[in-house]
Amino acid sequence: MLLLLISDTHLPKRAKALPAELLARVPRADVVVHAGDWVDTATLDLLESRSRRLLAVHGNNDGPELRDRLPEVARAELDGVRVGVVHETGAAQGRERRCAERFPELDLLVFGHSHIPWDTTAPGGLRLLNPGSPTDRRRQPYCTYMTAVVDAGQLTEVELHRLPPRTG
């Protein structure tokens, strides 16, 4: 099962559209995971229409329309892996402990907010992934997203993808 992990798209404020490379991967993914800060409903509509399955939450920059359509926390079992999605997890210091305490039932937590890619494992085994942002790199050298594979209850092949700089 192929997962496509994205967050913090901030359209149309940070970019006019999702990068073509990312959009091309959407229909090939078994599950698209979006960890919030969409900003516009058009991006949600687009991903809902092109995704086989969308697992998504709202973020702190999302208004009432998105909050009406998306939860603050989403959970799903994907081929034996218990996955959660949330936008904010607080400061980097102590993140693993806080998230493991808040989500003891999960194997994987996908989050966003910082626009900074993150891949760690908490004591006890909770994997924490932040795919960064495909549209707003902030202080990072690249805009990013992640892919991962779930196979027979195991998360494998986690990969951070760097997007080329936007032109124009």
Image (tube, grey):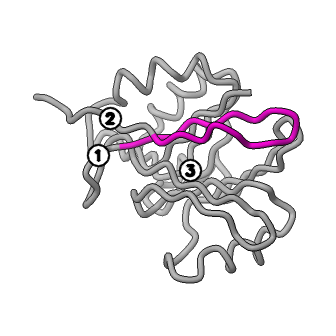
Residue position marked by numbered label 2 in the rendering: 163
In this picture, which residue range is highlighted in magenta?
144-160
Q: Residues within 10 Å of mark 2 (few under 14, many from 20)?
A: some
From the viewer's side, name the closer residue of 25 and 88.
25
Q: Does dot 2 land on a helix, a strand or a loop? A: loop
Q: Viewed as shown, does residue 5 lie left or right of 54?
A: left
**For residue 154: magenta?**
yes
Given the image, on which type of amino acid does mark 2 rest? Leu
Instruction: Residue 51: give x, y in percent of width and height.
Output: 62, 23
66 w.r.t. 112: above or below? above
Q: Is residue 160 above or below residue 116?
A: above
Along the polypeptide, which appears first: circle 3 or circle 1? 3
> What amino acid is at disc 3?
Ala
Q: Disc 3 marks which residue? A: 35
Q: Earlier in the sequence, mark 3 or mark 2?
A: 3
10 Å crowding of disc 3: few (<14), some (14-19), many (20+) = many
Instruction: Report the residue at 60% width, 41% height from top.
Output: 158
Q: Amino acid type of disc 1?
A: Tyr
Residue farthest bottom in this picture: 94
Give the label, 3 or 2, closer to the camera.
2
